Image (cartoon, coloured by chain):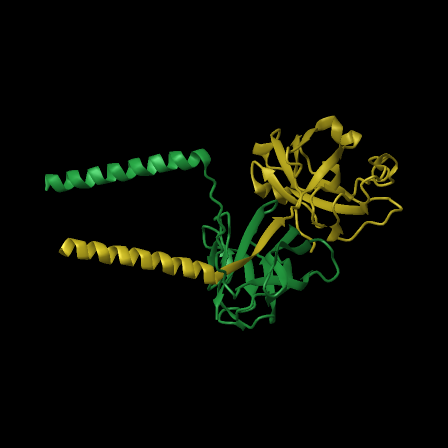
Chain colours: A yellow, B green
Amino acid sequence: MTKTKISALLMTLAITLSLVGFTYAHWTDVIKINGHVKMAHILIGIKSEKVLMSGDVEKYSNVTYEVSPDEHTLEIHSKNLRPCWYIWVGLVMQNQGTLPGKIKPPEYSYDPSDSWGDYFETTEYFYGPYPENTGFGNLETWGKVKINEQLQSNGTVIFTTPSTPTPFTLNPTEKAVIWIWIHCKLDIPDDAQGDTITLYLNIVDDIAV
Amino acid sequence: MKDKILVILSFIFIAMSITGFTYAQWNDTIVIRNTMTFGYWNDTLSMGFVEPLNCVDNEVTENVGECNCHYADYKIDNRTGMDGYNTTIMIINNGYPGYEVHCNLTLQNIGTLALHINRTVISDPTSVLTWNATLSALVDTGGKPILNINMTALECKELASGETLKVQIRVGMTQNTEQCHTYRFQVRIVYEEA
């Protein structure tokens, strides 16, 4: 008898609950706002590079260079450095991202040690921005640039095109030219004579909005 | 006891036999036509998104980020003849840290019954981000805010039939957002009969 009562109660409860659920479902409803956010990206990469040396420097120093696969860094390996040693590094940079980027002087680091930065001085000149389809072969600041002509041994340049003050904005697909004079200003330590010094030129990505 | 069970089983057997026989007979020649009329609810509870709808961003001089919004899932209330939409879709492209989108939308009670907005539930339908009410942001697994979401307070708002309510939802991208990444969010507005 008790069992029958309990069963009846449970059945009543189950029926009541299902009715309540049905009624609630019927008298409540939902509307939605669906959002989809796709983020942009910034990528200022090295599209072309030149490392120029004077004939005098070429006689005693060996320089090789390569651009990193991510196009962010130029590695310059130099041997037999002396206080008069200098090179001119030219880069064509392009904004390959979807955001306007800020062009700023690159960051320098050195191997075997960043303390090697004390032995060097650098001067940068920026030109642009240029549209993507610019013919760089005929561009005054890139195409026929030579050392000891437009690029002087004392770190100055002779271009009719004025340099662009930094930072400046490089919109997506636009390009810019940068010329960097790298000069060894101090005599390197005796124990490092003949060693290969690697200089890393890192392009800095920065959003310009 | 055994007799009782036997009687019950026999009774079921006979009943089923009669049913089978009857069905077989009917299946042969008889067609039964019938009309059944069901009752219906006189009142309807329905809220929808209606015009006006617009979307603006916080860019003044630049035009980098893009925002777009539209309604989807059309519905019409047969009792009132009013129509609306079940879903608002916000699409933000080329977002970046500091980019903010304001979406101004309109709610309308298109049913016959007065309604009461119960709650709003903000979430990431992909379950990658979780809602942090204190920060008013969808946060990543490390608790860092990714999308700041602020919305007009809707809880406990009541709408009579035909009444509209303007709502603003503001979505901001924080410094913790990742490049090239796609984030999703969903706001569920739950309502009930007032």
Which is nearer the eye, B183 or B79? Answer: B79
State the image quarter where residue A33 is shown: bottom right
Give the residue displayed 60% in from the left and 46% down from the top. B179
Question: Can residue B34 be spotted in the picture?
Answer: yes
In the figure, B37 relative to A158: above or below?
below
State the image quarter where residue A179 is shown: top right
Q: Is A173 on the left-hand or right-hand side of B151?
A: right
Which is nearer the eye, A106 or B34? Answer: B34
Which is nearer the eye, A138 or A158? Answer: A138
Farthest left residue in view: B1
Give the residue displayed 34% in from the left and 35% down from the top. B20
Q: Please provide percent x and percent y for residue B163.
A: 60, 72
State the image quarter where residue B170 is shown: bottom right
Q: Is A194 on the left-hand or right-hand side of A102?
A: left
Which is nearer the eye, A110 or A165? Answer: A165
Question: Can residue B188 be spotted in the picture?
Answer: no
Q: How many marks?
A: 0
Quadrant that contains the N terminus of chain B:
top left
Give the residue displayed 48% in from the left and 40% down from the top. B31
Q: Please provide percent x and percent y for residue B10.
A: 20, 37
In the figure, A20 relative to A84: above or below?
below
Q: Please provide percent x and percent y for residue A163.
A: 82, 49
